Amino acid sequence: MKTIFSGIQPSGTITLGNYIGALSQFVELQDEYNCYFCIVDEHAITVPQDPVVLRKNIRSLAALYVAVGIDPEKATLFIQSEVPAHAQAAWMMQCISYIGELERMTQFKDKSAGKDAVSAALLTYPPLMVADILLYSADLVPVGEDQKQHLELTRDLAERFNKKYNDIFTIPEVRIPKVGARIMSLQDPTKKMSKSDPNQKGFISMLDDAKQIEKKIKSAVTDSDGIVKFDVGNKPGVSNLLSIYSIFSGKTVTELEAQYDGKGYGAFKGDLAQVVIEALTPIQSKYNELMESSELDDILDRGAEKARLVANKMLKKMENAMGLGRKRR
Protein backbone atom coordinates (compact mmCIF):
# COMPACT_ATOMS: atom_id res chain seq x y z
CA MET A 1 0.00 0.00 0.00
CA LYS A 2 1.39 3.40 -1.00
CA THR A 3 1.84 6.18 1.55
CA ILE A 4 0.35 9.68 1.46
CA PHE A 5 1.44 12.61 3.62
CA SER A 6 -0.47 15.86 3.95
CA GLY A 7 -0.07 18.82 6.30
CA ILE A 8 -2.39 21.75 6.97
CA GLN A 9 -1.47 24.85 8.97
CA PRO A 10 -3.61 25.69 12.02
CA SER A 11 -3.79 29.34 11.06
CA GLY A 12 -7.49 30.09 11.18
CA THR A 13 -10.66 28.14 10.52
CA ILE A 14 -10.81 25.80 7.54
CA THR A 15 -12.89 27.14 4.65
CA LEU A 16 -15.34 25.43 2.35
CA GLY A 17 -12.59 25.56 -0.28
CA ASN A 18 -10.17 23.67 1.99
CA TYR A 19 -12.85 21.09 2.69
CA ILE A 20 -13.73 20.51 -0.97
CA GLY A 21 -10.15 20.65 -2.22
CA ALA A 22 -8.54 18.58 0.52
CA LEU A 23 -10.33 17.26 3.61
CA SER A 24 -13.30 15.65 1.86
CA GLN A 25 -10.95 13.79 -0.46
CA PHE A 26 -8.76 12.65 2.43
CA VAL A 27 -11.73 10.63 3.66
CA GLU A 28 -11.63 8.63 0.42
CA LEU A 29 -7.85 8.33 0.41
CA GLN A 30 -7.70 6.70 3.85
CA ASP A 31 -9.28 3.55 2.40
CA GLU A 32 -6.77 3.33 -0.44
CA TYR A 33 -3.49 4.52 1.09
CA ASN A 34 -1.41 4.52 4.26
CA CYS A 35 -2.21 8.11 5.27
CA TYR A 36 -0.38 10.54 7.56
CA PHE A 37 -2.35 13.72 8.22
CA CYS A 38 -0.30 16.31 10.07
CA ILE A 39 -1.26 19.60 11.73
CA VAL A 40 1.83 21.61 10.84
CA ASP A 41 1.99 24.03 13.77
CA GLU A 42 5.73 24.63 13.32
CA HIS A 43 5.01 26.01 9.86
CA ALA A 44 2.42 28.35 11.35
CA ILE A 45 5.00 30.18 13.50
CA THR A 46 6.94 31.43 10.47
CA VAL A 47 4.69 34.47 10.98
CA PRO A 48 3.74 35.93 14.39
CA GLN A 49 1.05 33.98 16.24
CA ASP A 50 -0.86 34.56 19.46
CA PRO A 51 0.07 31.47 21.53
CA VAL A 52 -3.41 31.10 23.01
CA VAL A 53 -5.09 31.40 19.61
CA LEU A 54 -2.59 29.06 17.97
CA ARG A 55 -3.20 26.34 20.55
CA LYS A 56 -6.96 26.71 20.09
CA ASN A 57 -6.58 26.52 16.29
CA ILE A 58 -4.49 23.34 16.57
CA ARG A 59 -7.19 21.58 18.55
CA SER A 60 -9.92 22.96 16.32
CA LEU A 61 -8.22 21.69 13.17
CA ALA A 62 -7.70 18.25 14.71
CA ALA A 63 -11.39 18.10 15.64
CA LEU A 64 -12.39 19.06 12.09
CA TYR A 65 -10.21 16.32 10.60
CA VAL A 66 -12.09 13.73 12.64
CA ALA A 67 -15.49 15.40 12.23
CA VAL A 68 -15.34 15.28 8.42
CA GLY A 69 -14.70 11.54 8.53
CA ILE A 70 -11.01 10.83 9.07
CA ASP A 71 -10.88 7.50 10.93
CA PRO A 72 -7.96 7.35 13.40
CA GLU A 73 -8.03 3.54 13.04
CA LYS A 74 -7.23 3.92 9.34
CA ALA A 75 -5.13 7.09 9.17
CA THR A 76 -2.49 8.62 11.44
CA LEU A 77 -3.48 12.09 12.67
CA PHE A 78 -0.88 14.02 14.66
CA ILE A 79 0.58 17.41 15.56
CA GLN A 80 3.92 18.25 13.95
CA SER A 81 5.60 19.74 17.03
CA GLU A 82 4.82 16.59 19.02
CA VAL A 83 7.20 14.65 16.74
CA PRO A 84 10.64 16.27 17.25
CA ALA A 85 12.13 14.40 14.29
CA HIS A 86 10.49 16.97 11.98
CA ALA A 87 12.60 19.84 13.27
CA GLN A 88 15.73 17.67 13.45
CA ALA A 89 15.35 16.42 9.89
CA ALA A 90 14.53 19.93 8.69
CA TRP A 91 17.93 21.16 9.85
CA MET A 92 19.65 18.41 7.88
CA MET A 93 17.63 19.24 4.76
CA GLN A 94 18.39 22.93 5.27
CA CYS A 95 22.09 22.07 5.22
CA ILE A 96 21.80 20.66 1.70
CA SER A 97 19.56 23.48 0.44
CA TYR A 98 20.90 26.47 -1.46
CA ILE A 99 19.94 30.05 -0.61
CA GLY A 100 19.21 30.77 -4.27
CA GLU A 101 16.64 28.04 -4.63
CA LEU A 102 14.92 29.09 -1.39
CA GLU A 103 14.82 32.73 -2.49
CA ARG A 104 13.12 31.66 -5.72
CA MET A 105 10.14 30.20 -3.85
CA THR A 106 7.08 32.20 -4.92
CA GLN A 107 5.52 32.16 -1.44
CA PHE A 108 8.69 33.61 0.10
CA LYS A 109 8.74 36.41 -2.44
CA ASP A 110 5.03 37.14 -1.91
CA LYS A 111 5.12 37.10 1.89
CA SER A 112 8.36 39.09 2.23
CA ALA A 113 7.63 41.73 -0.40
CA GLY A 114 7.69 45.27 0.98
CA LYS A 115 8.50 44.22 4.55
CA ASP A 116 11.43 45.63 6.54
CA ALA A 117 11.75 42.75 9.00
CA VAL A 118 11.19 39.26 7.65
CA SER A 119 11.60 36.11 9.73
CA ALA A 120 14.46 33.87 8.57
CA ALA A 121 11.97 31.01 8.85
CA LEU A 122 10.00 32.39 5.90
CA LEU A 123 13.07 31.68 3.78
CA THR A 124 14.02 28.35 5.35
CA TYR A 125 10.68 26.70 6.04
CA PRO A 126 10.55 24.78 2.72
CA PRO A 127 13.22 22.34 4.03
CA LEU A 128 10.89 21.69 6.99
CA MET A 129 8.13 20.84 4.53
CA VAL A 130 10.60 18.56 2.74
CA ALA A 131 11.42 16.82 6.03
CA ASP A 132 7.71 16.40 6.82
CA ILE A 133 7.24 14.44 3.63
CA LEU A 134 10.46 12.43 3.47
CA LEU A 135 10.32 11.18 7.06
CA TYR A 136 7.33 9.00 6.17
CA SER A 137 8.59 7.78 2.77
CA ALA A 138 5.55 9.34 1.17
CA ASP A 139 4.82 8.17 -2.36
CA LEU A 140 2.19 10.84 -2.97
CA VAL A 141 1.51 14.32 -1.58
CA PRO A 142 -1.90 15.87 -2.30
CA VAL A 143 -1.43 19.60 -2.82
CA GLY A 144 -3.06 22.57 -4.47
CA GLU A 145 -1.50 24.32 -7.44
CA ASP A 146 0.11 26.88 -5.12
CA GLN A 147 2.27 24.20 -3.46
CA LYS A 148 3.60 22.47 -6.58
CA GLN A 149 6.83 24.48 -6.44
CA HIS A 150 7.55 23.23 -2.91
CA LEU A 151 6.97 19.65 -4.05
CA GLU A 152 9.48 20.15 -6.84
CA LEU A 153 11.98 21.31 -4.22
CA THR A 154 11.17 18.22 -2.13
CA ARG A 155 11.98 15.98 -5.07
CA ASP A 156 15.20 17.91 -5.81
CA LEU A 157 16.46 17.72 -2.22
CA ALA A 158 15.56 14.04 -1.87
CA GLU A 159 17.49 13.21 -5.04
CA ARG A 160 20.41 15.42 -3.92
CA PHE A 161 20.60 13.65 -0.56
CA ASN A 162 20.31 10.19 -2.15
CA LYS A 163 23.17 10.90 -4.56
CA LYS A 164 25.46 12.62 -2.04
CA TYR A 165 24.97 10.37 0.99
CA ASN A 166 22.83 7.29 0.74
CA ASP A 167 19.83 6.23 -1.29
CA ILE A 168 17.27 6.25 1.54
CA PHE A 169 14.49 8.59 0.40
CA THR A 170 11.40 7.81 -1.65
CA ILE A 171 10.93 10.46 -4.35
CA PRO A 172 7.34 11.66 -3.87
CA GLU A 173 4.87 12.42 -6.61
CA VAL A 174 2.41 15.31 -6.63
CA ARG A 175 -1.27 14.44 -6.37
CA ILE A 176 -3.55 17.27 -7.50
CA PRO A 177 -7.13 16.85 -6.18
CA LYS A 178 -9.57 15.42 -8.73
CA VAL A 179 -12.19 18.15 -8.32
CA GLY A 180 -12.55 21.37 -6.43
CA ALA A 181 -8.84 22.15 -6.41
CA ARG A 182 -9.64 25.83 -6.75
CA ILE A 183 -12.85 27.00 -5.12
CA MET A 184 -12.88 30.74 -5.59
CA SER A 185 -13.71 33.70 -3.35
CA LEU A 186 -17.40 34.53 -3.13
CA GLN A 187 -16.58 38.24 -3.44
CA ASP A 188 -13.76 38.06 -6.01
CA PRO A 189 -14.19 34.90 -8.10
CA THR A 190 -10.87 35.53 -9.85
CA LYS A 191 -9.05 34.68 -6.59
CA LYS A 192 -8.92 31.42 -4.63
CA MET A 193 -11.12 31.20 -1.52
CA SER A 194 -8.82 31.86 1.43
CA LYS A 195 -9.19 31.92 5.21
CA SER A 196 -6.79 34.90 5.23
CA ASP A 197 -9.12 36.99 3.06
CA PRO A 198 -9.75 40.28 4.95
CA ASN A 199 -13.28 40.29 3.49
CA GLN A 200 -15.19 37.83 5.67
CA LYS A 201 -17.88 37.54 3.00
CA GLY A 202 -15.35 36.06 0.59
CA PHE A 203 -15.19 32.67 2.27
CA ILE A 204 -17.42 30.24 4.12
CA SER A 205 -15.89 28.81 7.27
CA MET A 206 -16.60 25.19 8.15
CA LEU A 207 -17.88 26.54 11.48
CA ASP A 208 -20.15 29.29 10.14
CA ASP A 209 -23.73 28.95 11.37
CA ALA A 210 -26.73 28.62 9.05
CA LYS A 211 -27.50 32.34 9.01
CA GLN A 212 -23.90 33.25 8.17
CA ILE A 213 -23.75 30.69 5.35
CA GLU A 214 -27.03 31.86 3.87
CA LYS A 215 -26.02 35.52 4.06
CA LYS A 216 -22.61 34.92 2.45
CA ILE A 217 -24.01 32.87 -0.43
CA LYS A 218 -26.83 35.33 -1.10
CA SER A 219 -24.31 38.19 -1.21
CA ALA A 220 -21.91 36.27 -3.48
CA VAL A 221 -20.81 38.19 -6.56
CA THR A 222 -22.50 37.04 -9.78
CA ASP A 223 -23.48 39.30 -12.72
CA SER A 224 -26.48 41.18 -14.07
CA ASP A 225 -27.89 38.79 -16.68
CA GLY A 226 -29.63 36.40 -14.25
CA ILE A 227 -28.75 33.24 -16.22
CA VAL A 228 -27.46 30.21 -14.29
CA LYS A 229 -24.81 28.95 -16.69
CA PHE A 230 -21.28 27.60 -16.27
CA ASP A 231 -18.86 29.89 -18.12
CA VAL A 232 -15.67 30.62 -16.18
CA GLY A 233 -14.45 33.24 -18.63
CA ASN A 234 -17.60 35.35 -18.74
CA LYS A 235 -19.44 34.28 -15.57
CA PRO A 236 -16.78 33.37 -12.98
CA GLY A 237 -19.02 34.03 -9.95
CA VAL A 238 -21.92 31.89 -11.15
CA SER A 239 -19.52 29.17 -12.32
CA ASN A 240 -17.91 29.04 -8.89
CA LEU A 241 -21.30 28.68 -7.19
CA LEU A 242 -22.29 25.96 -9.66
CA SER A 243 -19.10 24.04 -8.83
CA ILE A 244 -19.87 24.19 -5.11
CA TYR A 245 -23.51 23.19 -5.69
CA SER A 246 -22.50 20.26 -7.90
CA ILE A 247 -20.01 18.90 -5.37
CA PHE A 248 -22.40 19.06 -2.42
CA SER A 249 -25.55 17.90 -4.25
CA GLY A 250 -24.03 15.19 -6.42
CA LYS A 251 -25.79 16.69 -9.45
CA THR A 252 -23.88 17.54 -12.60
CA VAL A 253 -23.46 21.15 -13.64
CA THR A 254 -25.59 20.43 -16.72
CA GLU A 255 -28.41 19.13 -14.51
CA LEU A 256 -28.21 22.24 -12.34
CA GLU A 257 -28.26 24.55 -15.36
CA ALA A 258 -31.46 22.84 -16.51
CA GLN A 259 -32.97 22.93 -13.01
CA TYR A 260 -32.56 26.71 -12.76
CA ASP A 261 -33.28 27.61 -16.37
CA GLY A 262 -35.29 30.82 -16.27
CA LYS A 263 -35.44 30.97 -12.45
CA GLY A 264 -32.78 33.62 -11.80
CA TYR A 265 -30.14 33.86 -9.09
CA GLY A 266 -32.41 34.29 -6.06
CA ALA A 267 -33.81 30.75 -6.10
CA PHE A 268 -30.42 29.33 -7.14
CA LYS A 269 -28.55 30.95 -4.27
CA GLY A 270 -31.24 30.13 -1.73
CA ASP A 271 -31.21 26.44 -2.61
CA LEU A 272 -27.41 26.33 -2.68
CA ALA A 273 -27.30 27.79 0.83
CA GLN A 274 -29.58 25.03 2.12
CA VAL A 275 -27.50 22.32 0.43
CA VAL A 276 -24.31 23.65 2.08
CA ILE A 277 -26.01 24.02 5.48
CA GLU A 278 -27.31 20.44 5.35
CA ALA A 279 -23.84 19.15 4.51
CA LEU A 280 -22.04 21.09 7.26
CA THR A 281 -24.53 20.63 10.12
CA PRO A 282 -23.54 17.03 11.02
CA ILE A 283 -19.85 17.91 10.71
CA GLN A 284 -20.29 20.84 13.09
CA SER A 285 -22.18 18.67 15.58
CA LYS A 286 -19.38 16.09 15.65
CA TYR A 287 -16.80 18.88 15.89
CA ASN A 288 -18.47 20.42 18.96
CA GLU A 289 -18.69 17.01 20.60
CA LEU A 290 -14.97 16.36 20.05
CA MET A 291 -13.86 19.77 21.28
CA GLU A 292 -15.44 19.06 24.66
CA SER A 293 -14.21 15.47 25.08
CA SER A 294 -10.97 13.63 25.89
CA GLU A 295 -11.49 11.45 22.80
CA LEU A 296 -9.64 13.97 20.66
CA ASP A 297 -6.60 13.95 22.99
CA ASP A 298 -6.53 10.15 22.90
CA ILE A 299 -6.57 10.21 19.09
CA LEU A 300 -3.73 12.75 18.93
CA ASP A 301 -1.67 10.87 21.54
CA ARG A 302 -1.92 7.63 19.55
CA GLY A 303 -1.18 9.44 16.31
CA ALA A 304 1.93 11.14 17.71
CA GLU A 305 3.23 7.86 19.11
CA LYS A 306 2.83 6.07 15.78
CA ALA A 307 4.33 8.98 13.84
CA ARG A 308 7.34 9.17 16.19
CA LEU A 309 8.16 5.49 15.64
CA VAL A 310 8.17 5.86 11.87
CA ALA A 311 9.88 9.28 11.78
CA ASN A 312 12.63 8.29 14.23
CA LYS A 313 13.62 5.30 12.09
CA MET A 314 14.12 7.54 9.07
CA LEU A 315 15.89 10.16 11.19
CA LYS A 316 18.45 7.56 12.30
CA LYS A 317 19.05 6.60 8.68
CA MET A 318 19.61 10.28 7.82
CA GLU A 319 22.02 10.79 10.73
CA ASN A 320 23.98 7.66 9.81
CA ALA A 321 24.16 8.71 6.17
CA MET A 322 25.48 12.20 7.04
CA GLY A 323 27.90 10.92 9.71
CA LEU A 324 26.22 12.58 12.68
CA GLY A 325 26.78 11.32 16.20
CA ARG A 326 27.89 7.74 16.80
CA LYS A 327 27.14 4.98 14.36
CA ARG A 328 23.78 3.42 15.17
CA ARG A 329 22.83 -0.11 14.23
Image (spheres, rainbow, N blue to C red):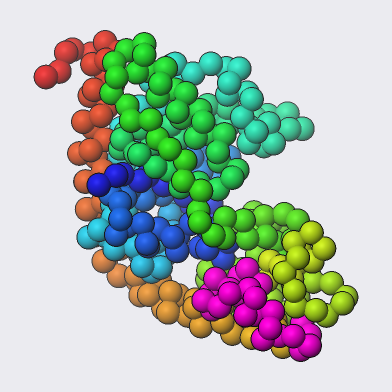
Q: Tell me if residue 234 can be seen.
A: yes
Q: Is residue 240 left or right of residue 23?
A: right
Residue 288: which quarter of the image?
Answer: bottom left
Q: Is residue 72 left or right of residue 193?
A: left
Observer able to see residue 13: no
Residue under the point 69% across and 76% down? 217
- From what the image shows, is residue 79 above or below residue 310? below
Q: Residue 263 location, x and y as percent?
A: 76, 89
Magenta region includes residue 291:
no
Residue 251 on image: x %, y %:
55, 78
- Give the camera-side residue of 123 and 291: 123
Which residue is more in the foreground, 242 or 164? Answer: 242
Report the side of 100 relative to 227 (left or right): left
Q: Is residue 4 left or right of residue 176?
A: left
Nearer to the camera, 204 or 149: 149
Residue displayed at 40% across by 21% down: 159
The quadrant the C terminus occupies is: top left
Magenta span of residues: 242-265
What is the quadrant of residue 113 in the picture? top right
Q: Is residue 264 magenta?
A: yes
Query: Which residue ends up furthest to the left in the rendered image?
Result: 329
Query: Can you give x and y, in whole percent of width and height, for residue 321 in the image?
Result: 27, 15
Q: Count the marks: how many?
A: 0
Which one is nearer the viewer's eye here, 74 or 322?
A: 74
**Residue at left 30%, top 55%?**
32
Q: How far across and down, in percent of the image, does residue 93 sit?
A: 41, 22
Indicate the quadrant where residue 75 lies: bottom left
* Residue 297 position (above or below residue 258): above
